[in-house]
Amino acid sequence: MQHSHDHGHHHHHGEGQTENRLWISIGLNFVITLAEFIGGIISGSLSLLSDALHNLNDTTSLGISLAARKISKKDANKDKTFGYQRAEIIGAFINLITLVIIALFLVKEGVERFYNPQPINGTVMFTVAIIGLLGNVITAVLLFRSSEENINIRSAYIHIMSDAFSSVGVIVASLLILYYQLYIIDTILTMVIAGYILWQSYYMLRETINILMASTPANIEVPDVKKAMTDVTGVHDIHHLHVWRLDEQNILLESHVVIDENDMDKMESIKSKLKTLLGTDFNIHHSTLEFEFKPCEKYGENPCH
Ligand SMILES: [Zn+2]
Ligand SMILES: [Zn+2]
Ligand SMILES: [Zn+2]
C-alpha cells in the first residue's frame, strides 16, 4: 500500500531561532508600548496613546503567534487526527480580527479629533516616535528572514513594517506640530495608518478564512484535477472530489474513483498512478481514494459519502 504521509511533523531549520526572534520582538514591543503610553500622557497626544494601545495589541499578537507555533508542533493523536497545524491558522485569525478592531478604534479617534483638536507637545511626541521607530526597525529585521515561512510570521512582519511606517509618519507629524502647530496632520495621519492596516488585514483575513472554510487552494483548479485523474488509464469517472488545506503547506484530497469491475486486479496500480499524479502535478501528498465499480447513485445532485 502506498501510504506515505507525515501528519503533524514540520521540522524546519532555524525554528528555535525564529522563536528567539519572536521572544525579542515581544520584549521590544512591550518597551515601545510603555514608552508611547507614558509619552502620550505627558504630551497630551491622543494619537500616541492609541498607538500605544496598538503596540500593546502587537505584543499580545506576537504572543499568540508564539503560542500557536508551539501548539501546532504537537503530534497528531487519537482526538486530533489531523494534528495541531490549524492552531496557527486560528492564531492568525484572532491576530487579524484584533487588528481590525484596533484600526477601527483609530478611525473613531481620528473622527473625534477632527471636531475636537487637542494641543500636543511636539517635542515629547518626536522623542517617543524615534524610540518607536528604532524598536520597530529592530523587530522587522529580526522577523525578516522567516517572513516566507507562514501566515503568522508574515502577518507579524507586514504588521511591524506598517508600524515602522506609522512611526516615520508620527515623526514627520511631530515636526509639523513643533514648527507650525499643524495639529490636523495628526488626525490625517491616523486615518492613513488605520486605512492601510484595514487594507492589509482584508487580504490576510480572506486567506485564513479560506483555509478555515476548507476552500480549494487558489493555485488548484478542481476541474483540472478531475480531468487529470480521469485521464489515468482504467479510470472511468471521478466524483465526490474535495480539495482543501489543513494549513498553508498541506493540501488534502478525497475522491471517489470509478473503475471497471474487470480491472479489480489493477486497482492498486491505478491508485499508485493517481497518487503519483496528485503529488507531482498538484503537490497533494495526502489523498483518500474510494474505489467503485459503478458510480454511486445520482452523485451529481446528491453526492453519497
Ligand atoms: Zn492518512
Ligand atoms: Zn502594530
Ligand atoms: Zn461515489
Image (cartoon, helix red, strand yellow):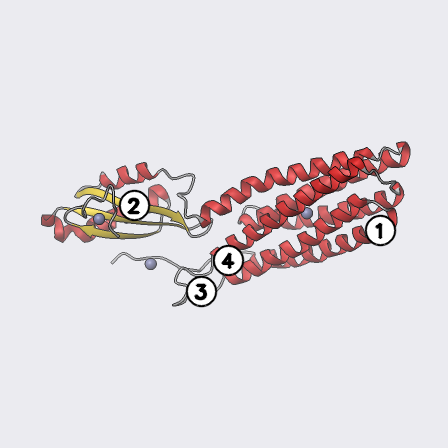
Give the residue pinned by disc 3: 75
Measured Cα–Cα span from mark 4 to mark 1: 37 Å
Does residue 146 appear anywhere in the picture?
no
Asked if ligand 2 lies within 8 A of label 1, the reply is no
Measured Cα–Cα span from mark 1 to mark 2: 59 Å
Query: Looking at the image, is mark 1 or mark 3 nearer the viewer?
Result: 1
In the rendered view, does 116 fall on the left or right side of 145? right
In the rendered view, does 41 fall on the left or right side of 267? right
Q: Quadrant of ligand 1?
A: bottom left
Give the residue pinned by disc 2: 241
In the rendering, which numbered label is found on residue 87?
4
Q: Earlier in the sequence, mark 3 or mark 4?
A: 3
Q: Nearer the viewer, residue 30 or 120?
A: 120
Residue kind at label 3, given as amino acid type: Asp
In the rendering, which numbered label is found on residue 41?
1
Query: Looking at the image, is mark 3 or mark 4 nearer the viewer?
Result: 4
* Few, some or many residues within 10 Å of mark 3 (<14, 14–19, 20+): some
Say which residue appears at 27% left-offset and 37% top-offset: 227
Say which residue appears at 13% left-offset and 53% top-offset: 265
Q: x, y percentage for residue 176?
A: 85, 33
